[in-house]
Image (cartoon, rainbow, N blue to C red):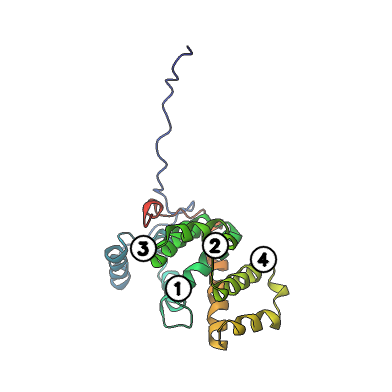
Amino acid sequence: MSEQNTEEMPAKQQNDAVTALNLSAMDPMPADIDKYLSICDEKLGLVPNVLKAHTFDEDKFRAFSGLYNNLMLEESGLSKLEREMVAVVVSSVNRCFYCLVAHGQAVRELSGDPILGEMMVMNYRVAKLSKRHRVMLDYAAKLTEEPSKVTDEDRQGLRDVGFDDRGIWDLANVIGFFNMSNRVAIAVDMHPNDDYHGMNR
């Protein structure tokens, strides 16, 4: 019999640092931003690390959170689930770990389907999707991978499955936002909250 390996197993990785950059949070924190973070903690059970990452600068925080809230939470021809599905597909193309973890969890929660959430993260093409969702996500992938090849034929394809021009505008902006935020998250090695991994499984 071989000797038992007595080497200590590595401890579970903890994401204590939000990014690889040393940017300190504002002190004191503006009262309205502090309240905003408290509301997030109350509603979500955590403060997303992407918000923590922006707390070093008041203007940066307001710009990011304002645009995110407008695109992802305000009235739109896209449902909240559809917007999260788009976020995951864009992030899958870009291999953005932070956004795949965070928005994959949102898809699991909003759809009530953990398997769909995993499919979105791994390869949306294996999922059984409606024609609308297939065309929407194909458009998101193409605009992410080959933006110069998007043509009016692609926009017409969206119209054919029910998107009006405002819906196409909203879709394009969600795709554009996550291409931007993916690149920032990757560039600064933004770490997703550990809690996301076990939620809505």
Q: CA distance from mark 1 to mark 3?
A: 21 Å
Assess whether mark 3 and mark 2 are in contact (beta carbons under 8 angstroms): no
Q: Amino acid at mark 2?
A: Ala
- Where is mark 3, residue-wise? 26
- Where is mark 2, residue-wise? 127
- Where is mark 1, residue-wise? 68
Task: Name the N-terminal-most of marks 2 and 3.
Answer: 3
Task: Name the N-terminal-most of marks 1 and 2.
Answer: 1
Res 176 visible: no
Between circles 1 and 3, the one closer to the viewer is 1
- Where is mark 4, residue-wise? 145
Residue at the spot 45% in from the left edge and 73% down from the top edge: 68
Q: Does residue 42 lie above or below 198 as drawn?
A: below
Is 138 on the left or on the right of 8, as rendered?
right
* Element class at badge 2: loop
Q: Amino acid at mark 4?
A: Glu
Q: Amino acid at mark 3?
A: Met
Task: Name the N-terminal-most of marks 4 and 3.
Answer: 3
Q: Quadrant of the C terminus?
A: bottom left
